[in-house]
Image (spheres, rainbow, N blue to C red):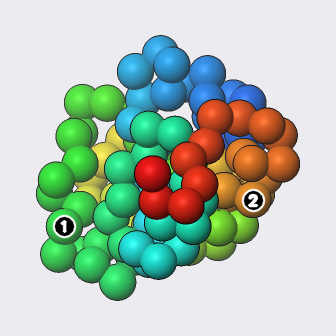
Amino acid sequence: MLGRMEEVTPQEGQRRVQQGALLVDVREQNEFDEVHAEGAQLIPLSEFEARYAELPKDRELVMICRSGARSARAGEFLKAQGYDSVVNLAGGTMAWVQDGLPSVQGGN
């Protein structure tokens, strides 16, 4: 069902990551270097179609970008490629940071 990604709040996204889901950041490298959710794996949307196979099919994937739009597109793409367990983080990295969840700033 294209166009309807399940959305989760940042808190729910973090809970799922703690239970073994993989957080996938689809922003570009420079955005990721500024700030990203702790533990996120970067696969920029510009490289996504070439690299999506790096992602495991046997783990839930929580997609994240800056505000939630690009990650929804990437998640829909994954679903079309046969990935079953994909959700989108509502509000993206901005909401994650705003909620005070663990994040890495300045490319540390």
Amino acid at pointer 2: Met
Q: Which residue is mark 2?
A: 94
Look at 31% across and 47% down and name the residue there: 83
Tell me which numbered mark, 1 or 2, is placed earlier along the sequence: 1
- x then y, percent, for residue 98: 83, 48
Q: Please say if 47 is above or below 10.
A: below
How packed is label 1: few (under 14 Cα within 10 Å), some, or many (20 or more)?
few
- Give the structural element (helix, strand or loop) at label 1: helix
- x then y, percent, for residue 32: 49, 65
- Give the structural element (helix, strand or loop) at label 2: helix
Among the 4 quarters of the image, the one containing residue 42: bottom left
Look at 71% across and 35% down and name the residue there: 101
Q: Nearer the viewer, residue 88 or 35?
A: 35
The disc at residue 51 is 1
Regarding residue 1, the answer to whether it shows in the image is no
For the residues labelled 1 and 2, the Cα–Cα distance comes to 25 Å
- x then y, percent, for residue 57: 23, 39
Is the residue under label 2 in contact with that under label 1 (CB below 8 Å)?
Answer: no
The disc at residue 13 is none
Q: Is residue 104 left or right of residue 92?
A: left
Q: Nearer the viewer, residue 30 or 14?
A: 30
Among the 4 quarters of the image, the one containing residue 9: top right
Look at 33% across and 64% down and name the residue there: 43
Q: Is residue 68 left or right of residue 21?
A: right
Amino acid at pointer 1: Arg
Q: Is residue 27 left or right of residue 20?
A: right
How packed is label 2: few (under 14 Cα within 10 Å), some, or many (20 or more)?
some
Regarding residue 27, the answer to whether it shows in the image is yes
